[in-house]
Image: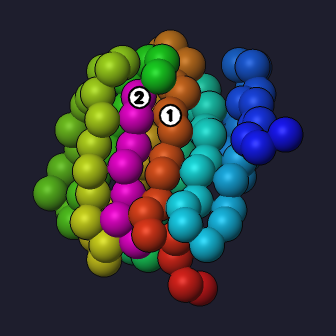
Amino acid sequence: MTESVFKLKKTDQKTIEKVILDENIHYMHMIFGKDDSLPTHFTNSNVYMTVLRGTLSIDLNEKGFYDYEIGTILKIPVGTKMTVKNNADDILEITVVKAPAPKN
């Protein structure tokens, strides 16, 4: 088999799964219920975030929260201060790709 196969969890429960962590990229899948969030942090690589379900509320560099709906892809540069949250009633599901893969 030439390809590697990965599957994302199908759930409505809070999930942070590291699907692929290799020397090229980090590919993560996250699911958040209302008011679930990630701790505020600085990006350690370029981040590509895709909204698969729900509405993403994100604050970048303390400029206030903006909301992004399903089908939106965000490109966030390395070193950006980020707070990710689900402020909506619906389940939020996102994928996060870090490229290049962080060195730490």
From the viewer's perspective, is 76 left or right of 63? right
- The residue at 56%/19% (across/down) is 91
What residue do we see at 50% from left, 34% from top? Answer: 94
For image coordinates 39% across by 43% down, the residue present is 49
Q: Is residue 66 visible?
A: yes
Please report the bounds of the magenta region as a residue range: 45-51
Circle 1 crowding by C-alpha within 10 Å: few under 14, some 14–19, many from 20: many
Measuring from the top left, give residue 15's x and y in whole percent.
72, 38
The residue lying toward the viewer, choosing from 57 and 50, is 50
Measuring from the top left, give residue 97's x and y in whole percent: 48, 51
Left or right, 1 with reference to 49? right
Q: Secondary structure at mark 1?
A: strand
Answer few, some or many: residues within 10 Å of disc 2's Cα (few below 14, many 20 plus, some between 14 and 19): many
Number of numbered tags placed on the structure image: 2
Question: Real-space Cα distance between discs 1 and 2?
Answer: 5 Å
How has the structure been colored for display? Answer: rainbow
Secondary-structure class at tag 2 = strand
Q: Is residue 44 left or right of residue 38?
A: left
**Type of amino acid under label 1:** Ile
Q: Are marks 1 and 2 in contact (CB under 8 Å)?
A: yes
Rendered image quadrant of residue 5:
top right
Q: Is residue 3 located in the magenta-colored stretch of the structure?
A: no
For residue 94, the mark is 1
Q: Based on the displayed image, in which of its 4 quarters is residue 42 positioned?
A: bottom left
Q: Which mark is residue 51?
A: 2
Specify the amino acid type for callout 2.
Val
Of the pair 18 and 60, the residue shown nearer to us: 18
Residue appearing at x 61%, y 39% in the figure: 30
Q: Quadrant of the C terminus?
A: bottom right
Asked if residue 81 can be seen in this view, the reply is no
